[in-house]
Image: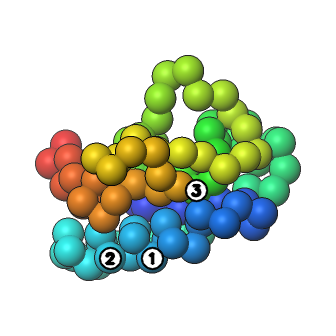
């Protein structure tokens, strides 16, 4: 499994989101390297289909992508059981990792 963590430095949500991703990987089990990618230009954002910081790609796919989300150098919001948040919950990340592992 290939996991990429995309962020831009001006977003305050990326550090807590990275911590949640690492916790989700611990819960999910197995050894997975996370490639951290700083998205700091429109060209890089376009290349990855970056819909905001932070973003997680699992095997090149954003499991939280919303079809209408534009490519942008901005902070991103996620729909969680508690409402909108700056990152997915650990549980949502574990579910995304499990789904990717099953495919």
Q: Are marks 2 and 1 in contact (CB under 8 Å)?
A: yes
Q: Residue at x 39, y 70 (%)?
A: 20
Q: Residue at x 30, y 72 (%)?
A: 25
Q: CA distance from mark 2 to mark 3?
A: 16 Å
Residue 52 picture location, percent across and down: 64, 45
Residue 66 picture location, percent across and down: 47, 29
Q: Nearer the viewer, residue 55 or 59?
A: 55
Residue behind mark 3: 54
Q: Residue at x 58, y 56 (%)?
A: 54
Q: Can you see residue 56?
A: no
Residue behind mark 1: 19
Crowding around mark 3 (Cα neighbors within 10 Å: few <14, some 14 to 19, many 20+) is many
Q: Earlier in the sequence, mark 1 or mark 3?
A: 1
Crowding around mark 1 (Cα neighbors within 10 Å: few <14, some 14 to 19, many 20+) is few
Q: Are marks 1 and 3 in contact (CB under 8 Å)?
A: no
Residue behind mark 2: 23
Q: Secondary structure at mark 3?
A: loop
* Residue 91 sits above or below residue 77 on the image: below
* Image quadrant occupied by the C terminus: top left
């Amino acid at each position: 499994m290939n996991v990429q963590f995309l962020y831009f430095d001006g977003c305050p949500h990326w550090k807590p989101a990275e911590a949640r991703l690492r916790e989700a990987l611990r819960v999910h089990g197995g050894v997975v390297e996370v490639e951290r990618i700083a998205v700091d230009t429109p060209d890089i954002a376009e290349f990855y289909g970056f819909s905001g910081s932070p973003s997680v790609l699992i095997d090149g796919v954003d499991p939280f992508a919303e079809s209408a989300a534009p490519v942008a150098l901005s902070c991103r919001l996620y729909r969680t059981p508690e409402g909108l948040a700056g990152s997915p919950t650990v549980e949502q990340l574990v579910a995304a990792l499990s789904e990717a592992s099953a495919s």
